[in-house]
Image (spheres, helix red, strand yellow):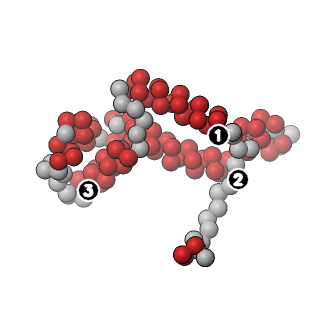
Amino acid sequence: MKLQENKYYKTFLKEPWPYAVGAVILAILNIAMFASTGKPWGVTTPFSYWGAWIYKSLGGNIDNWFYFQQATHAEAIKAGFWKDLHSISNLGIIFGALLSTLLASQFRIKRLNPLGK
């Protein structure tokens, strides 16, 4: 039997999941992240850290920036990428979305139409 004909492959990887299932899974993951880190799941704050880490690696200085003078942000910047659970989860979201698209055979590189034409 081919993998593409397997009913579990079709159910879990090929066919789209209902939105309610995705919502429940995301809620459980958010509860787990909040319980383990004391902070709810956030996407934008880790992206600001990514920008700061890149800027610092290029020789920039963020020590005088108000945002990164706040204790929680300063600690996260000092700890680094691999110590920030929210950055790791964002990376997981990016690679998970790519993997799910590849597994569902939905990955396409398309030329964008300028001005929505």
Label 2 with label 3: CB-CB less than 8 Å: no
Residue 51's place in the image compared with 80, above or below, is below
Q: Quadrant of residue 55?
A: bottom left
Left or right relative to 106: residue 87? left
Q: In which quarter of the image is residue 41?
A: top left
Q: Mark 3 points at which residue?
A: 55
Label located before the other in sequence (2 or 3): 3
Q: Closer to the camera: disc 2 or disc 1?
A: 1
Instruction: Classify 10 Å Cα crowding around label 1: few (below 14), some (14-19), many (20 and above).
Output: few
Q: What element carries label 1?
A: helix
Q: Name the residue under label 1.
A: 19
Q: Where is residue 86 in the image (x, y as percent from the top left)?
A: 39, 38
Q: Which amino acid does label 2 sit on?
A: Ser
Identify the residue at image location x=17%, y=47%.
66
Residue 57 visible somewhere in the drawing: no
Placement of the C terminus among the 4 image quadrants:
bottom right
